[in-house]
Each structure stands twice: as C-alpha cells, then as structure tokens.
Image: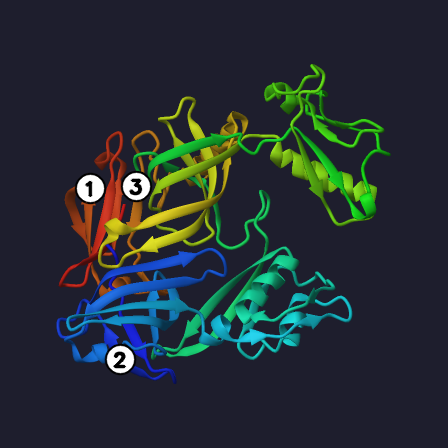
Amino acid sequence: MMENVRVAILTAQDTVCGFMDNSVDEALHFYDDLLHNYLEGTSNTFDFKASAKHPDSEFLAVGNKLSFRYNGRDYYMNIMNVKRTEYAVEVRAYGLVFELLNETTAAYKASGAMSFEEYVRAFNFADMLTVRLNEVADKRLVHEWSGSETILARLFSLANVFSAEVEFVPVMNPNYTLNRIEMNVYKEHTDGVQGIGRNRSDEILRYGLNVKGVTKTSDITELYTAIRPFGRDGLTVRSLDKKEYDADGRVEFESPQGSWNILAVQAKDAFPSNTIDSVADKYICKIWDFDTDNVNTLYGQALAELKKLCVPKVTYEIEGYTEADIGDTFTVQDEEFAPVLYLSVRISEQEISFTEPSRNKTRYSNVRELTAEVSDTLLAQMDRLIRENKSYSTNGVVFKNGKGSTTLTACVRSGAVDVTDDFSIRWFKDGEIAAEGKSLTVAAGNVGEGAVFRFEADDGTKGIGRYE
C-alpha cells in the first residue's frame, strides 16, 4: 500500500498557501499523478490533475512551488506548466530551484588546477548550494568553459570533468518551506565504484516477482573488427608493433609495425567480412580520429574504442517495478532464459503514482550480463549472507534441533523517526492472525519445518503498511 503524500502549495516567495491531501475529505485532491525520478542529478518531475472547482486550485499557478515528503526524502518543485479547463487543472512541476534551471553562468577559464568545491565557489554557486559529501575532494584539475550555459548544465559538465556524479538533495523546514539544497558529489559509477545509490547486488530481483520480463536484443549493425586511428597532423600507429593477449594466451588484438590499423583478430574470425576479395583480409575497418600528438595515447584510446566496436551491441529491456532508490544496483535473475540469465542492473529512472501504484515502473541502466563464474560468486555471497543471518538465539530466523525461540519486533518509520508506538500492530502466521502488539515471541515448537510471519500497522482507520 502506498503511503499517503501531503503536498504543500507555496507562493513564489516560499509561503505556504494551501495543501493537497487525498486522505482529507475537504482538501484539494490530486489524481492521474506520476512522480518521475531520474538518475542524473537525482532530478524529478511531478505531473498530476486536480479539480478546478476546489477553491485551493487557484494556487496551482506557474511560478508557485510544491513540496512534500515521500519515502524519507524531501521534494521541492517549481510549477512550470498549467493547463486549466472549467473542471480540471493539469500541472507539471520540475525539481530544483528555478535559478538552477533557467539562470545562466558565463564562460570560465581556470588559471591553475582547482578542486571541485573551488570551481563551485568560482562560479558563485556556493550561496545556493551546500556541498555535503565530496568523494573527489582530493582531485585538482584545470579546465575551461568557452560559452555560457545554465547553472544546472554547468554543474553536470563540472561533474563530467571530474569523472563524478552529482546528487541534489532539497532539505525542507518543518513547515514545508525550503531550508537549503545540499549537493553530494560521488565518484562516477563503474564496476568497482557505486556512485549515487547503494550497492545491493546481493539482492536478487527475480522473474515473476519484481521482474515481469526481460527482452535481450543483440545487434551487429555497427560492428567493426579493425580501427584505423588518426591523431594530430596525420599521426598514425604505423611505428608501433603491438599484440594484446586474452586470458588463455591467444592473440586478441594486434597492430603490426607498418600497419595503419589495430586488428581485432578473434572478432574477425567470429564476424568475417565476406565482401573482401582477399581471403587474408576479412576485417571490417572504421576510420577514427582522436586529438593527440602522442602515438601511445592514440593507440590506447583507439584500442579502447575497438574493444567496444568489435562485439555485438547487446541491450536489455526489463519490465517491472522495484521499490528502491535511484542509483541502487541489483542482480536480476531470469530462469526462463536458457541458460539462466543473470544481469547486474542499476536503477536510472522511477515512475511512481501515489494514487495508482499499478502505473509504477522502474528503468535500469549500466546493465551488464554476468557470466556463470560470476553467478557462482553471487551464490557464494548469498550463502554467506544466509550463514551470517543464521542465529539460534533471540532475533534469529533459524531454529536448531527443534529448540529455542526468537522475538520478532515491528518497526514503523516516518523518515528516520520511529513511530511504531503510534500504530496498532497485528501479527499473522501463514496468513492467520497470531497476536497483537509490537513484539511477538516465536518458539521452535510452534513453527514446524517453516512458517511465514508478517505484521500489519493500522492507525485506527486503515492499514498503512506491512512487512513479512
């Protein structure tokens, strides 16, 4: 069950002038709503409709603000577009303060190496943004921006220069007005670095549960098995004599002395060109330019590009919804594939409807197919987690030799605040009512081979959540 979200409507001067609350009969209600969260900057949009007959609908005007709390996070948004008829108001709001979206900043050239925060201060952004976490604080770089751009675009560009990801976190006052906007700076996501979000790869999203289906598409339309790189002033790799080997000691890439090209030897054998007259030359070559006067840099960058070009382009479409945060990394398992498909995925977009949860969708990026060897590693991780959670005393989930007991304790939070005592808690065992109260003691003799316990929290009018 989705939590009820109370949305404050504020004037352009950040004064609360009304509320939308679907749990209050007399309040302005919203419907056809969709909160769309994006990975880049953790930005978001909010679309919804409301009745034009309600007097508070007059506050739904361009330039006004919306703020609300959902899933422990504050949202502060600008109303950017309003369509009004005699009966309904249709609203679109964007996250972040208006200045980040529309105000521009001038060209800038650093006189020397500067840190990320020094650039932020040089751009005069420090007054509107508080840098809270900075994982690239020790890095100093020289860079130049030759043209003007919006503040938001400049911050994204700065993050790209520092191989970083930025997250904007609005922090509201208790009265729903804006206190400040914090910016977290993370190292860019790679196989070994998480970036925004949490690494939850030991949690598996399974077909038929969190995942409705996976579509895998393989495409060799833009596949190349050789690359001919050129640097400044006609620089080539002809002076080099290079060979790269795979894990089994076989030549995978080579660039013989005197050759213009870097060759993907094994890829050529897998995907030979049948239109070349010479039997010895079955390569499909791409001409490629890179701005450098160093031949080794030219070779290294061209080899990296060839490694991407010489394999089929594989894309995945994953249908389903996962209740998680933007940037979180999971493992997807689809047993309907033969062999079983394992993917490492990262949440890049979330579409959430507070009034129609069936519309919720999750989109993923950084999708990477895991090999059987890696899958074995994942299984080992799962075994380790199971062993760590096996406890034969209070708060464990496994009983030994039919002996012992454990105490299950319910917890309900509003953000970071424990509000369990504000609700009535009812416990169920295998779907049947077992007890009422915050805690439940389970003895081994009452479980048998296994049992599923869950609790439901109720505020006296309706159930607000459950966990099992």
Asked where in the image residue 213 lies, by quadrant, the reply is top left
* Residue 429: image tag: 1
Label 2 is placed on what type of residue? Phe
Of labels 1 and 2, earlier in sequence is: 2
Question: Can you say whether 134 is above or below 58 in the image?
Answer: above
Say whether disc 1 or disc 3 marks the residue closer to the N-terminus: 3
Mark 1 and mark 3: span between their CA atoms? Answer: 15 Å
The foreground one among 406 and 151 is 151
According to the picture, the residue beneath numbered tag 3 turns out to be 405
Q: Amino acid at mark 3?
A: Ser
> Which element carries disc 2, helix, strand or loop?
helix
Task: State which tag comes first along the sequence, 2 or 3.
Answer: 2
Residue 156 location in percent, x, y?
Answer: 57, 62
Query: Which one is in front, 460 or 38?
Result: 38
Quick check: 99 left or right of 415? right
- Viewport quadrant of the N terminus: bottom left
For disc 3, the neighbor class at 10 Å (few under 14, some 14 to 19, many from 20) is many
Alpha carbons under labels 2 and 3: distance apart? 57 Å
At x 72%, y 70%, the residue is 109
The local secondary structure at tag 3 comes to strand
- The residue positioned 15% from the left and 73% from the top of the image is 86
Say which of marks 1 and 2 sits in front.
2
Where residue 161 appears, x then y in whole percent? 65, 59
Apparent side of residue 104 relative to residue 84 in the rendered image (left or right): right
